[in-house]
Image (cartoon, coloured by chain):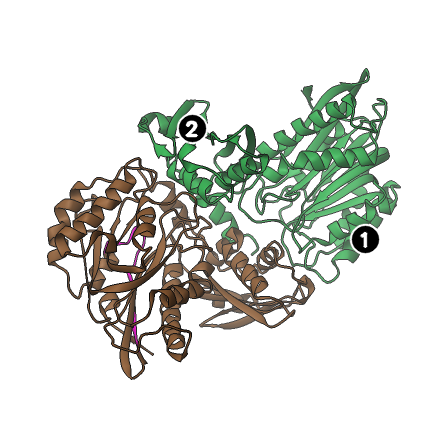
Chain colours: A brown, B green
Amino acid sequence: MDIISGGVCAPKGFKANGIHCGIRKNKTKRDLALIVSEKICTSAAVYTTNLVKGAPLLLDMEHLKDGKAQAVICNSGNANTCNANGLEIASDMAKLVEEYTGVKENDVIVASTGVIGQPLSLEPIKNGMKELADGLGDNSKFASEAIMTTDLAEKEIAFSFEIGGKTCKIGGIAKGSGMIHPNMATMLVFITTDVAITSQMLSKALKTDIASTFNMLSIDGDTSTNDMVTVLANGMAENPVIDKEDENFAIFAKALNSLNIWLCKKIAGDGEGATKTLECITEGADTLEAAKKVAKSVVCSSLLKAAMFGADANWGRVLCAIGYSGADVDVTKVAVKFKSPKGEILVCENGAGVDFSEEKAKEILLENEIDILVSLGDGKFGATAWGCDLTYDYVKINGDYRT
Amino acid sequence: MDIISGGVCAPKGFKANGIHCGIRKNKTKRDLALIVSEKICTSAAVYTTNLVKGAPLLLDMEHLKDGKAQAVICNSGNANTCNANGLEIASDMAKLVEEYTGVKENDVIVASTGVIGQPLSLEPIKNGMKELADGLGDNSKFASEAIMTTDLAEKEIAFSFEIGGKTCKIGGIAKGSGMIHPNMATMLVFITTDVAITSQMLSKALKTDIASTFNMLSIDGDTSTNDMVTVLANGMAENPVIDKEDENFAIFAKALNSLNIWLCKKIAGDGEGATKTLECITEGADTLEAAKKVAKSVVCSSLLKAAMFGADANWGRVLCAIGYSGADVDVTKVAVKFKSPKGEILVCENGAGVDFSEEKAKEILLENEIDILVSLGDGKFGATAWGCDLTYDYVKINGDYRT
């Protein structure tokens, strides 16, 4: 499996674009994205578990009932959520895609991200549609820029791999910076692939994969109202259609997993105000659930996140987070290490502190990719969760986001 | 019921003191507290639910098995948690109290608060005991200062009330600023009363009360390892002994509730880095559990907490927190108001935004006591939760607390 360029346009038959249409005041910030496949695709999606759901998601659930889609339109700057006319606007966005690209309205996936509770005007979208559609091409980068909100970097990746002698490709773009918390599709992720796969198997691959990828990611403990992960597969790689859990399915699942882990790490590192990516890797748990609970609890702890910002080897906060994780852990068996490109240091063993060099620990923790290795000594299960540090800038960004 | 002075020394027969013994480097900060009752007390306690428990708590569970206690010793600056010799040190602290006050070792409640995972030296405590015991008197204030960690203000209150023609008193001190989250005794609270009450009824009153007070308080979502609430009742008010759920029990429960709510608000307002106290009051829930879940979820949202710091009426974040609270809520019936001493403003009705004056909202939110009023339109249950805003100083305090 190789990393390739092109993002969502890397797989055969996909075009994309992103423009500034005027939803955002800043004219240099693109705010409207479009992805279109030449052929109709099998498609699968997972949605936020928040009871308050953005209007576009309600529309998408309808549109994806048949497991088919062909285009994605997404705006940033406004979430189109908690608005009386939200569903109407989302539906109008799909109609505009049909008008300008020929893709049928109910094969369009609509997404919105930004402020909640402010009416979204169709006007700028309508006015921008011609430019958006005319510019469709190898422009994954523009699309990835257009879906950003408080993100600082676009998140775009693609991989190539082989199934049944055919070269297949998978590409993805993601947006996600705040209001991200495990147990749902927690951000916007649009994945394209030219693999031939049934919608049933595509859905299976996606749902299985997010349990160990996007659902193990937390920026701030807030579960968004608007987020989802969607995959469109147009079959243009001409591999034998994947319709069961065979070797080919495993290859595709592996490619999907590599893509999703890459995007998870990028999203974590671009968490609002973040200066460090945190990765908690647990091992020795007696169940997978316990391994996951502990890993998530550690990366979600505000106190640990703040300590990591300060490069403070405050392992007591790791123990504390393990203790309230809800997992049935024997704390007297727990060992903790901090690790980064500068090395690795044992700070706790058998649930108690060990002598360690504060200087070495500081050197390790001053890096911007920190692994927290937790050994539970209770069994054979492990898990990984991703997060980021808690910084002054998180407070700044969220103290005055709306006005 | 009247507020009176004297804190934990207000009830008859209680003396207290607090000194600097040297656990902390700062010589102007008291770090060792002692509360002693003239007579043996019935006593009850609730403890943190964290699986990682401070050594003192393990000792206290033993000491309180008989429902009796007579003294409390508490140090700040070191949590005596995750240390190999923790239980031994805690036990030695109880022995020192016996040596210097005559109160039997197993009638002593021991508590420690501060950094986790650094061995606690008995030396400074031993050296300070004579001064601490000699100074026992009407010094609730010194005790309340000595249990503070990152707290900025001491938390001390007392009430007087009448039972069976006798004047009774209840007093309390509390420590709590970070690592505070619902569903356990989430901070150190020491309550004294001269009411005559059986240990069984005292325990019942405490456990019932914390469900709507300390368990509805969150500063940062982190559940501490060391915290507890204890009550000592020495019976010196000479009221008829409370031994069942009668009218007198109700009077005592009311006094306990007033004391605990007062301390909850104080702890919330003194949350690490906080500039504002947040109170979320829900009504119209179809169950008490739903009312509580929604109220807690709102005060726990990092995004909302940051918005409140910025005095930004970002009600979408309230809706978002309601949506992921886990309560089964019909979001189309939700109404939200913000309220402070400057007035009250409706910002959301039927789950959607309403027109409101941003100027008026700003004026309301610039105050330092903010109520978030959530109406669910689904039933007759309500609840209140307390919290605080998320600020630069929270990050500062926790980015470098240990070193």
CA neighbours of label 2 inside 10 A, class few (<14), some (14 to 19), many (20+): some
Res B337 label: 2
Question: Amino acid under label 2?
Answer: Lys
Q: Residue at x 34, y 74 (%)?
A: A242
Q: Residue at x 73, y 54 (%)?
A: B55
Locate the C terminus of chain B by quadrant: bottom right
Mark 2, chain letter? B
Looking at this view, is B335 or A105 the one in front? A105
CA neighbours of label 1 inside 10 A, class few (<14), some (14 to 19), many (20+): some
Question: Amino acid under label 1?
Answer: Asp
Q: Secondary structure at mark 1?
A: helix
Q: CA distance from mark 2 to mark 1?
A: 53 Å
Residue B51 relative to residue A342: left or right: right
Q: Position of residue A389 (x, y in %)?
A: 45, 56
Any part of residue A20 in sight: no
Residue carrying label 1: B92
Range covered by the magenta-colored residues? A146-161
Looking at this view, is A172 or A339 the one in front? A172
